[in-house]
Image: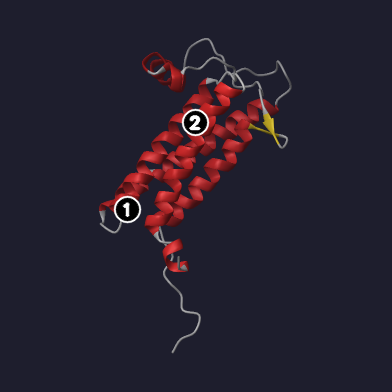
Amino acid sequence: MTRQSFFSPRFLWLLLAAGSASLVIASLALTAWQNLHPCHLCIFQRLLYLLLAGVALAAGLLVPRPPARWVGFFALPLAAGGLAVAAYQSWLQAQPPGSVSCVGGELGLIERLVEWLGQLQPELFLATGFCEEVEMTILKLSLANWSVLGFAVCLALAYRAWRPTPERRLFSS
């Protein structure tokens, strides 16, 4: 594989699709294996990774046609939104125990969406935990912290695929 094809928009879109889908599969496997209780924000991030995988796959299959850029554009706000949600959850988890809670008096838009999806597809979207609780750490990072990193990588890949850099010649003839 040449350097040019490695950084081609098609390769980057397909890499983003595979990576996002892999993160969803990993979250489902960890939930079942470790008996985790995902919260509304966890489930919403899972949904964003699923949407990101679908958008990236569509853009990768459409390259080099012009609609690929239009479809691929939607990966940018999805990844940025996921980054914001994961960062917020990480912030919640960093607060002293009992000082903050993700459970409010009335369900917000995200919670209502997750509740609705949980009724339709409970094995994928049922929220049973609390956002401020850290149920599992890997290398001293919570799963929300890892999701921040995951969405940051997704955002960088999506931007690079959507706005490829022109080829530069090292040596001109």
The image quarter containing residue 132 is top right
Task: Name the residue carrying label 2.
Answer: 45
Name the image quarter holding the C terminus: bottom left
Q: Earlier in the sequence, mark 1 or mark 2?
A: 2
Reply above or below: 148 against 110.
below
Three-letter code, disc 2: Gln
Where residue 124 appears, x then y in whole percent? 44, 22
Give the image's coloring scheme.
Answer: secondary structure
| Residue at image coords 59%, 35% | 87
Name the residue beneath numbered marker 1. Answer: 69
The quadrant the N terminus occupies is bottom left
Q: Amino acid at mark 1?
A: Arg
- Between residue 31 and residue 56, name the one nearer to us: 31
Label 1: which secondary element? helix
Residue 12 location (% of width, % of height): 43, 54
Taking the spot 45% from the left edge, 47% from the top edge, the residue there is: 16
Q: Nearer the viewer, residue 96 or 154?
A: 154
Q: Residue at x 71, y 37 (%)?
A: 139
Give the left or right position of residue 122, taking residue 39 as reference: left
Furthest residue in direction top, as rendered: 105
Q: Position of residue 15 (x, y in %)?
A: 45, 50
Would you say the residues marked 1 and 2 are in contact, meaning their CB atoms lie under 8 Å apart? no
User: SS for tag 2?
Assistant: helix
**Position of residue 65 in the picture relative to residue 79 (left or right):** left
Compared to residue 15, the image places residue 77 above or below, namely above
